[in-house]
Image (cartoon, rainbow, N blue to C red):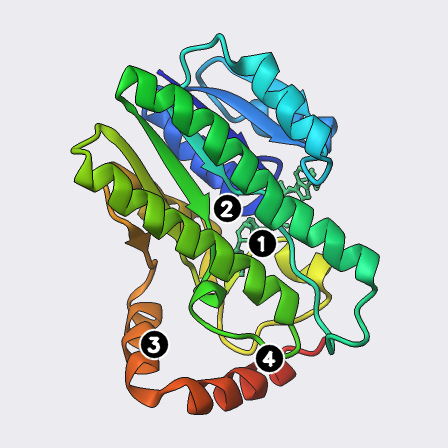
Amino acid sequence: MKALVTGASGGIGRDIALILSRMGYDLILVSRNTDKLEQVKKHLKTDVQIISADLSVEEECFALYEAVREQEIEILVNNAGFGAFGRFSDIPLEQELNMLNLNVRAVHILTKLFLEDFCKKDRGYILNVASSAGFLAGPLMATYYATKNYVLRLTEAIYEELRKDESNVHISALCPGPVDTGFNDRAQVKFALPGMRSFDVAKCAVEGMFANKAVIIPGFPMKLAHIGEKFLGEETMLKAAYYFQHKKKG
Ligand SMILES: NC(=O)c1ccc[n+]([C@@H]2O[C@H](COP(=O)([O-])OP(=O)(O)OC[C@H]3O[C@@H](n4cnc5c(N)ncnc54)[C@H](OP(=O)(O)O)[C@@H]3O)[C@@H](O)[C@H]2O)c1
């Protein structure tokens, strides 16, 4: 039993790795920072391979796949991602393109390559970490929200294709609200709402993945908020999103 987790050096990815290891899975941990991955490895009881890769670089996504494709991987967790705060016109284009490369292209490439292999074997799980941002447009974090919309919709569509085929390959999108991790430091924001514990989100994610859920929303308040969004309509939600985003300014 083996799982590959991207962005496993901290936050949600580290805690997903921890939970899968406790369940007996050997792990391949991926991020840019080998030292941090070594720290995570110390807390894991199963076999761990560390791969340092910058997944915002397309070639490194393909190289990662080539490095592990012969191994019997059953679970792919596409978790690495980051956000940036500010008016669309103010955020540097290079930073946004980097975000698109990591949050969208890397997820797309790895999902495609691993899904092909999983389908040949007719077994496997893919967990794509989207966000509650995937349900909305996000003024002041426009690009980040758009990337998570992409991840969510891509995952839902693949889910339905697999379900129709009665496949034993499963795919899920994780859509948490605020989670206490290193995310805010990189995005240079502070949460407008209290954040969930990363470990609780990871536990909910793993349970939801094994329950073959299309969309996993950790925590009752966020589930409720998602239902509320459907009743409030696009225009009101856009204004509400601006209000809450503006409160995030660090
Ligand atoms: N925290 C939240 O409130 C929240 C809410 C909803 C969704 N999410 C999503 O959850 C996922 C995990 O974020 P987190 O909250 O756990 O934040 P985090 O603590 O900042 O973790 C992000 C992870 O991604 C890795 N990473 C960043 N850039 C990378 C790159 N170019 N190549 C490879 N790995 C890279 C980081 O490792 P290195 O720095 O070592 O490379 C780190 O392990 C993200 O997709 C995020 O969008 C977070």
Separation of disc 2 and disc 4 at Cα?
Answer: 22 Å
Q: Is ligand 1 closer than 8 angstroms to the Cβ of mark 1?
A: yes
Residue at 63% across, 77% down: 248
Which element is circle 4 on? helix
User: What's the residue type where badge 1 is placed?
Assistant: Thr
Tell me: 85 left or right of 11.
Answer: right
User: For mark 3, what is the residue?
Assistant: 225
- Mark toward the start of the polypeptide (1 vs 2): 2
User: What's the residue type where badge 2 is placed?
Assistant: Ile
Residue at 44% across, 30% down: 76
User: For mark 2, what is the residue?
Assistant: 12
- Mark toward the start of the polypeptide (3 vs 2): 2
Question: Is label 4 in contact with label 3 (beta carbons under 8 Å)?
Answer: no
Separation of disc 1 and disc 4 at Cα?
Answer: 18 Å
Residue at 66% across, 20% down: 63
Question: Is label 1 in contact with label 2 (beta carbons under 8 Å)?
Answer: yes
Which element is circle 1 on? loop
Which label was assigned to residue 181?
1
| Discs 2/4, front | 4
Question: Is label 2 in contact with label 4 (beta carbons under 8 Å)?
Answer: no
